[in-house]
Every structure is written in structure tokens, then in C-alpha cells.
Amino acid sequence: MSMTQIVPHGKDTAIQGELYMSFELGDKSWKLTASDGQRGPSRYSVHAGDTAAVLDCVRRARERCQLGPQARVHSCCEAGRDGWWLHRWLTGQGIDNIVVDSASIEVNRRARRAKTDRLDGDKLLVMLRRYHAGERVWSVLHEPTPEQEDARRTHRELARLTQERTAHMNRIGSLLVLHNLRVPVIVGGRDWATWWERHREQVPPVLRGEIERESARLALVKQQLKALEAARRQELAEGKHPLVAQLARLRAIGHKGAWVLVKEVFGWRRFANRRELAGCLGLTPTPYDSGGSQIEQGISKAGNKRARAMLVELA
């Protein structure tokens, strides 16, 4: 007989010989909830990132559930700021881990509901057991390789720097309006230094210093943007990204749009049909058809927001 045995247990089905564990990941501490489906859950708290303590919790949970060291361990955690390192480490320890989309976890629909790390851990544990019993209870994310994950950093940093550049430009313009100075040129552009030199004496000294420091930060952001864009153009010219070049051959799709779509979606994900693709990008419809109400609420916006924004822009 195998170590995994399914036996009736009241109205539920209990799975013997396997340990289930949920992770509630916080900034300073992690809450672990574990059970074999036969006993009540055991709860542990470890410092965030303490992998040795996690292994010790697994050992203690096995002992409490009277499971052998070879008993299979299933775990789950929500996608978030910790990225994929924990998933890869757990997999390397022989633990069957999954990363789930937080938005797909069912919640109580009352206007006010209790929410604590303990309740969240218990909920994840129950849903993990249901998932391994064959129910489709949530959305499981696909893991990119470390190389694929790292390849997404370039365009994400470019997007962040572009937002910072806009913020600095708007800030400088707003500070100048305090003294009725309207900038007729692009802040930080080719004619900005000349314009500012002619008008800087009209600004009080403290505010003048603030604007000049803001201008220095703007210049640094523009310098980093220029360097990143030049490096990306060089890689494309050297043929290091053939999928990007192939997609860019389509009409109305340039290298910037092709880069985002390939690195975020098409370069590492595989789709069986267009419905899967639309679901990944959050482009599926969300009808509301209940009783006498028939409303189309628009696209779900539940997928990759960067790729979706690029597709909407290209459209």
C-alpha cells in the first residue's frame, strides 16, 4: 500500500500520509499553518526569510501528525513582493509548492469581515486541500525561469524611470506657478537651461534651490533612461532577442511594444487557445446577467497589466 491513502471521514475526504502547509508572508514575520487533514491545524511563526526555521516547522508538523520523513509536503503561498525565490527554494527542498493569485481566493462578501493572518492561513490551508482533491478553487501562477524573470527588469525599470521623469517635470512646473512663471519650453529639454537662467532671479532663494535640486534629479533620470534605451537598442542590433525582432516585423508594432509583449508574455508562456491568452491578459468579458439585469461590465483587467496596457495602446 502506498503512503497516500484516501479514506472517508464524515462528509469530507481526508488524505492520510501527506502534509499540507500554507504560508502567510509578511514583511517581518511569516505565519505557517500545517495539517494532514486528520488533525486540527498547527500554527508557527518564523522571521521573514528564515529558511532554516521553515524546515524546522516542517519537521515539527510531521512529528505532530505522526508522518514519516518521506511524507509528501504540499504548500501554497500568495503571489507578492517576495517574488519566486521562496517557491524555488521550497521546490528544491522537495516540497510541492504552488503560488496562487491573491485575487482568485474566495472571500466572505459581507460588508465587514474579520481578517487576520491566522484566519488567512486557515483559509489557504483549506483551499489547498480542496485544490489537491481536484477542485478548481483558485488560479495558480506559472513560474518563469530566473533568466526569464530577470529579462523583464529592463522595460519595467524604463517604465518606472519614465514615470519619475514626468513627476519631476510636473513638480518643477508647479513650483514655478507659485510665482506666476509659466514655462513655455519643455522642462529639462534643450531650451530649459537658457530659460531658467533668465528667470531664476525672479524666484526666492530657497525655492530656487529646490527647483535646481529637482532639475538635477530630472537630469539624472534622463541620463539613466538614455543609457538603458541605448543598451536595449544595442542588444536588438546584435540579434540577441530574435522573438522581439520577429514580432516587430508586424505592422504598427515597434521594438518597444514587441519587447514588452515578448518579455511579459509570449517569450515564456504557452497558450492552448485564444481564450487562455485573453485570460492571461485580462481581456475577457465580464457579463452581469442575473434576473432582469443584463450588463456587460467590460474587460476583467485581471491579467498582466503591463502587456494589457501595451496591447490597448497598440490597438
Image (spheres, rainbow, N blue to C red):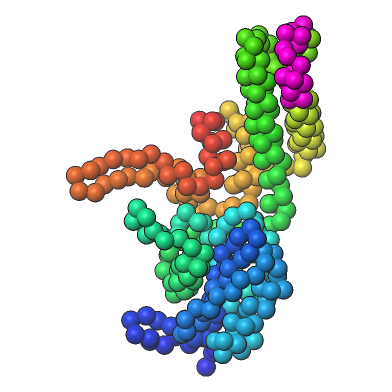
Relative vertical location of residue 61 with respect to residue 299 in this rendering, above or below: below
Residue 71 % position (x, y): 59, 84
Q: Residue furthest left?
A: 292
Asked whether 115 falls inside the magenta stretch, the response is: no
User: Which residue shows up at 65% across the image and 23% down it?
Assistant: 171
User: Which residue shows up at 26% across the image and 47% down it?
Assistant: 289
Q: Is residue 89 left or right of residue 299?
A: right
Relative vertical location of residue 107 with respect to residue 58 in this rendering, above or below: above
Q: Main secondary structure of the magenta part?
A: helix
Residue 170, by quadrant, is: top right
Asked whether 206 falls inside the magenta stretch, the response is: yes
Q: Residue furthest bottom?
A: 1
- Which residues, given as a range, are shown in magenta? 198-215
> Is residue 215 among what the camera can see?
no
Q: Residue furthest top?
A: 198
Residue 164 % position (x, y): 67, 31
